[in-house]
Image (spheres, grey):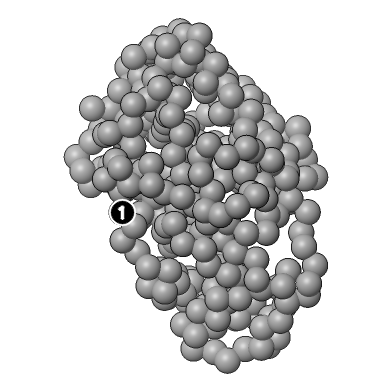
Amino acid sequence: MKILILGSEGFIGKHLVEYFLIRGIKVYGCDLFETASDRNYYYYKVSRLSPEWDEIFSGEVFDICINAAGSGNVPYSMQHPIHDFEANSLDAIRILDAIRKYTPACKYLHISSAAVYGNPQSLPVKESMQLHPLSPYGWHKYISELICREYHELYGIQVTMIRPFSVYGNGLRKQLIWDLCKKMQDQEVITLFGTGRESRDFIHINDLCFLIDRVLDKGEFKADIYNAGNGIQVYIETVAALVNQHFDSNKSIQFNGESRKGDPLNWEADISKVKKLGYQPSVSLENGIKEYVSYFKGLGLK
């Protein structure tokens, strides 16, 4: 079997490369960098303005394509919506059209985002709930899902989609837990946005890789959609306390009461659909944060 991972040098992409290589699968990948950090997989460099999707898909027959590429920065999307659209919507149709033309039997797994939900009316969030994105990033992920449905319904491309909630783990150098570690290292008083009672559903990258494996193996690829989370609502103040604890510090943590535009208030995923495929979370948040703090300290940042 041949798997092509788009965005193979990104946080999720790198972990997927490693996950499938360990399982003896022939892995191909592509990204914007000149060379890959891991030379054990076949790597294509693509350009941002003119990605060579036709060249890649006409030159090799892939069994599976996983799209882990795109921009994943909500504040950046608020300031640069056109760039975010190009990365998260335009590239999706370019990729799917190359599959349509050259390898129509290739299965396509699209990594969308829980950002498509916005502020859900009730918890836990089911895949069937009405979507209310709060940011260009959320809207463009929603548009990419519609493109996936278009190519399945009109051209018969085998497509499935996952909506990850808050993915974390070693190698991630942005978002909440990274920011907390940086502030624990550099500041005596830690100030965070919000009230602390905002919540997220955190999924460790190892669990996400396993979830994707289950979807690839058991999913129908009929434009079906799966939540990717732990199925547990965790308050931000709880995460901050765990980082504080495992950082071996006793820093003062305060919340400024201000919300960031584009950020939802509360999330908890209903993961019953993906559980039916054999998925079960294995990494607790406490163990995941403990491991992440150790990873952060090992970087030796000043």
Give the residue pinned by disc 1: 280
- The answer to which quarter of the image holds residue 91 is top right
Q: Residue at x 43, y 29 (%)?
A: 224
Residue 179 located left or right of residue 77: left
Q: Is residue 15 in sight in this rendering?
A: no
| Residue 124 spot, x, y in % from top left | 52, 53
| Residue 234 spot, x, y in % from top left | 53, 67
**Around disc 1, counting alpha carbons within 10 Å, would you say few (fewer than 14), some (14 to 19), or many (20 or more)?**
some
- The answer to which quarter of the image holds residue 101 is top left
Q: Residue at x 56, y 61 (%)?
A: 200
Query: Is residue 122 shown above or below 104?
Result: below
Q: Residue at x 67, y 59 (%)?
A: 265
Query: Is residue 221 shown above or below 297?
Result: above
Residue type, label 1: Gln
Q: Is residue 261 in sight in this rendering?
A: yes
* Residue nearest the viewer, comparing 224 with 243: 224
Secondary structure of the residue carrying numbered label 1: loop
Quarter placement of the C terminus: bottom right
* Residue nearest the viewer, comparing 179 with 213: 213
Q: Residue at x 44, y 39 (%)?
A: 226
| Residue 144 spot, x, y in % from top left | 59, 28
